[in-house]
């Protein structure tokens, strides 16, 4: 039962605007929803000749969730409710499928004993005992569903040797159950069934107890000491899934770790930082620049190949005739221009016309060297030195004396990063100098203009072709909803 | 045995990962592995921890002085994106068990997926044909990667190894080219830098840079205090980021082999991490059901993407090409689509019948692929 302290904490969260809820807090919700004062009214319902004890309706739950979790959309409340139901915290009294409906369907709350937090991993022996005892009690409400009967038959075959044992255990359980009050039994039976609906779900339902194997060993019950629902002592060892194998524990929080952390933190105190406003501006302008190229926001031309089955898009990309849109991107940054093989080619052509292509060729050579297998690196490094940096090199590049010194030092023990400084220097040079001129150059501008207005016969045909394809095949794919100006 | 249990108990107790109180008081308290510390040693630890907390407070204060605005404020004038509705264009069927990972190739039509049915499948996403179906030695695979060249794929998992496969072998058969073994914990993620280098993250809390040719470790990046769950490489291949079960994300300089920055704030394991397309910001997804955006130059968190109705952990994430949208896969079978600048949910992809375990946006941004425990992959746009 939730006491006032819990309620206070819960409300406080809302106050602080921290309306985010973690999966582990589901149990707080489930506790509160059953609270006498703050929860839904749990009541006994009279039905035909019998009474149905301890139930609430689906609508009650949905309404309560909407009110207490500040949810406006009932569909969202249903979604959350279904998540909670799927883990078995409450269940429909007349169905094996654990979901929440926003109507008069009756639901009951699960007993804390059966809550997932107790790390149940019930064995098939337990399940066999359960199904077996259900067949022993002549009550229509306890009749096995088809899939349960199939499961029982399978288990009987699997446990043929110890079936007598299982049968005896089932009988013992029935005896224990009989001692309980009739109403209490109704409730407990349904709770037990809901437990098994979670751990042995109806075919077609998701088993919510399935754990991500990466997280298993960090659970509360890491050694997965198996406890039986019915108090059986585990005999022998079953084949263990990886969940149960003891895995490596990395040592955490030693003195050494804390000392290292302190050293690191000391370097961080006075590190250079940019103002949030500047950084925000930079992010906003980047997204703005690229929005036109973002398929999820702006429908791209040509047609969406996954609907039209038309790979025209990539044929175009691969072709030597890049579209205007694609060439426009080369103007965004040097990175963008170099990323595109066609852009790289054009830039190189431009540099050749200025007799400064050795910079780009040097940069590309170093990029290539960095991707080579380790054994080739040393040779490549020397080749690059000979071509670009040595005395009288055929493609001599202009490095400042400092970088030159550093680089020649590096080459005494050539490695992948020997040219890092030199590469950075040359890149900056290209970016600030050649690249800006490239963007203004005739080579680039003429090409952009040419693609803008396809005046030629061929140009017109191409664009007509494109149009026909896109209209014909992409009507379904046309995303006019992409960029809606909301009022 | 008893001693192990004892230490484990202490680690679990002081981990407090479940009730969130771990990070609520703002300081990440490191669990103490006691074993047999004397009281004076305990006192020394206390002093050190106090010093550490003090430094963290100073850094927080320093970061605050640069908060002259927020991203949301700055983006107030930006045009609204409107409801984003993506449709399933293709469903890739063929796996027989949970899919744990997928990765697009750089050519934008091929992708590779890994499933606990013990198979690595390379798909042609246009035709939905299987280009390769590679049987794995260990079926407990957790990650896969496609090399930028398209020549290699890699995978790994509970075998603690990263296995490299050559797709372009001489006789047409796909064979294991290398088995990179040295991690002492499961392989959670791997990403190629080139055909000769690959970075891996592991449950042993470290990340490693390998030389594929020789199969040796070149650099070990240690520092995380919990399982490293995911990693991402910067667009210029000079840095990589890792997210871990110590609730932090770290930026590593590959060449200098150092941790450059650490970002905290999450209240549970970080399962997914990725770079913002311009390489200047980092996006994380956590079991605390939120995603966060951290800027590298501002050295702090810019935004948190959260909603009361989202209660399930984030398993995977991918930004759209422009960075305007963030797609995040969750345990509740859905993918949430966020407007990254305004932190508003602008769409949901609901099409899987089980947890969405992996997600990726193709290199040219034309499509997004989701993989799920329901054994299917779906292509959306």
Image: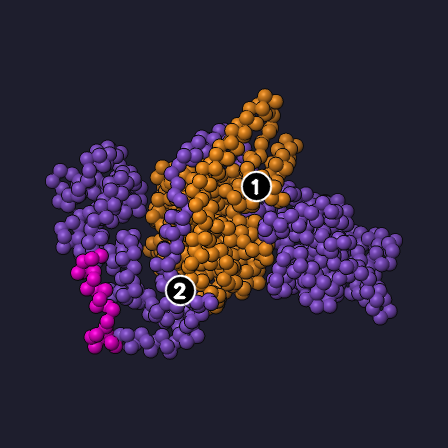
- In the image, residue A242 sits, relative to residue B126, either above or below, namely above
Secondary structure state at the residue bearing disc 2: loop
Image disc number at residue B23: 1
Alpha carbons under labels 2 and 1: distance apart: 38 Å
Image disc number at residue A295: 2
Image point (26%, 74%), residue name: A462
Depth check: A184 or B268 in front?
B268
- In the image, residue A481 sits, relative to residue B303, either above or below, namely below
Q: How is the image coloured?
A: by chain
Q: Position of residue A56 (x, y in %)?
A: 75, 62
Chain that appears purple:
A
Q: Residues within 10 Å of mark 2 (few under 14, many from 20)?
A: many
Magenta part of the chain:
A439-461
Q: Quadrant of residue A479?
A: bottom left
Image point (70%, 49%), residue name: A7
Chain that appears orange:
B
Check whether the beta carbons of the residues at disc 2 and disc 1 lie within 8 A of each other.
Answer: no
């Amino acid at each position: 039962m939730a006491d006032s302290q819990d309620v206070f904490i819960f409300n406080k969260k809302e106050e602080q605007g921290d309306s985010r809820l973690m999966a582990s807090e589901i149990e707080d919700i489930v506790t509160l929803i059953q609270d006498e004062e703050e929860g839904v009214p749990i009541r006994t319902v009279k039905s035909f000749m019998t009474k149905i004890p301890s139930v609430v309706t689906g609508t009650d739950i949905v309404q309560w969730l909407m009110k207490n979790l500040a949810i406006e959309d009932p569909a969202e409340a249903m979604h959350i409710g279904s998540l909670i139901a799927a883990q078995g915290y409450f269940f429909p009294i007349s169905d094996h499928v654990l979901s929440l409906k926003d109507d008069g369907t009756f639901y009951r709350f699960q007993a804390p004993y059966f809550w997932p937090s107790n790390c149940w991993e019930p064995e098939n022996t337990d399940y066999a005992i359960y199904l077996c005892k259900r067949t022993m009690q002549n009550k229509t409400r306890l009749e096995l569903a088809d899939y349960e009967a199939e499961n029982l038959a399978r288990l009987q075959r699997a446990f043929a040797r110890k079936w007598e044992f299982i049968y005896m255990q089932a009988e013992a359980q029935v005896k224990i159950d009989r001692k309980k009050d009739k109403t209490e039994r109704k409730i407990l039976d349904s709770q037990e069934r809901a437990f098994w609906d979670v751990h042995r779900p109806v075919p077609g339902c998701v088993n919510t107890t399935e754990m991500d194997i990466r997280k298993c060993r960090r659970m509360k019950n890491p050694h997965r000491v198996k406890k039986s629902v019915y108090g059986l002592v585990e005999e022998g060892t079953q084949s263990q899934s990886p969940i149960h194998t003891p895995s490596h524990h990395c040592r955490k929080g030693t003195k050494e770790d804390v000392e290292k952390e302190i050293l690191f933190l000391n370097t961080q105190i006075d590190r250079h930082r940019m103002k949030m406003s500047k950084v925000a501006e930079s992010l906003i302008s980047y997204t703005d620049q690229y929005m036109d190229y973002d398929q999820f926001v702006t429908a791209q031309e040509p047609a969406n190949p996954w609907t039209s089955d038309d790979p025209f898009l990539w044929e175009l990309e691969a072709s030597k005739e890049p579209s205007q849109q694609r060439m426009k991107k080369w103007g965004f940054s040097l990175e963008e221009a170099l990323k595109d093989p066609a852009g790289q080619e054009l830039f190189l052509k431009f540099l050749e016309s200025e007799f400064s292509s050795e910079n780009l060729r040097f940069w590309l050579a170093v990029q290539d060297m960095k991707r080579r297998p380790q054994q080739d690196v040393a040779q490549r490094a020397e080749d690059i030195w000979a071509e670009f940096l040595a005395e009288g090199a055929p493609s001599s590049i202009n490095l400042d004396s400092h970088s030159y010194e550093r680089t020649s030092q590096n080459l005494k023990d050539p490695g992948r990063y020997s040219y890092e400084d030199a590469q950075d220097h040359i890149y900056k040079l290209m970016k600030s100098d050649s690249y800006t001129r490239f963007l203004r150059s005739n080579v680039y501008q003429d090409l952009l203009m040419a693609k803008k207005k396809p005046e030629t016969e061929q140009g017109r045909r191409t664009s007509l072709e494109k149009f026909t394809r896109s209209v014909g095949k992409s009507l379904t794919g046309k995303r006019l909803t992409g960029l809606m100006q909301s009022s | 045995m008893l001693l192990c249990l004892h230490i484990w108990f202490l680690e679990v107790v002081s981990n407090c990962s479940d009730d969130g109180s771990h990070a609520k008081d703002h300081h990440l308290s490191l669990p103490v592995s006691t074993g047999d510390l004397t009281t004076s040693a305990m006192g020394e630890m206390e002093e050190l921890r106090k010093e550490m907390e003090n430094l963290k407070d100073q850094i927080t204060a320093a970061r605050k002085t640069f908060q002259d605005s927020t991203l949301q404020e700055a983006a107030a004038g930006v045009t609204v994106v409107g409801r984003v509705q993506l449709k399933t264009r293709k469903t890739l069927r063929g796996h027989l068990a949970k899919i744990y990972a997928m990765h697009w190739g750089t050519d934008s039509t091929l992708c590779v997926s890994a499933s606990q049915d013990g198979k690595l499948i390379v798909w042609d996403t246009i035709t939905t044909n299987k280009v390769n179906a590679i049987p794995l030695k260990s079926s407990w695979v957790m990650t896969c990667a496609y090399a930028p060249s398209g020549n290699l794929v890699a995978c790994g998992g509970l075998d603690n190894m990263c296995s490299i496969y050559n797709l372009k072998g001489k006789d047409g058969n796909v064979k294991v080219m290398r088995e990179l073994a040295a991690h002492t914990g499961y392989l959670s993620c791997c990403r190629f830098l080139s055909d000769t280098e690959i970075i891996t993250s592991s449950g042993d809390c470290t990340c490693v840079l390998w030389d594929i040719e020789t199969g040796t470790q070149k650099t070990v990046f240690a520092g995380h205090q919990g399982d490293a769950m995911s990693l991402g490489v910067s667009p210029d291949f000079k840095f990589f980021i890792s997210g871990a079960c110590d609730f932090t994300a770290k930026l590593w300089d590959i060449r200098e082999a150092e941790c450059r920055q650490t970002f905290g704030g999450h209240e549970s394991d970080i399962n997914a991490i990725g770079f913002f397309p311009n390489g200047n910001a980092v996006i994380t997804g956590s079991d605390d059901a939120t995603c966060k955006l951290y800027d590298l130059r501002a050295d702090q968190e810019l935004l948190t993407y959260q909603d009361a109705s989202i209660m399930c952990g984030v398993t995977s994430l991918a930004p759209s090409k422009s960075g305007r949208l963030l797609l995040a896969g969750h345990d509740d079978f859905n993918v949430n689509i966020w407007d990254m600048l305004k932190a508003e949910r602008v769409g949901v992809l609901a099409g899987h019948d089980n947890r969405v375990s992996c997600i990726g946006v193709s290199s040219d941004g034309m499509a997004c692929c989701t993989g799920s425990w329901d054994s299917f992959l779906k292509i959306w746009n």
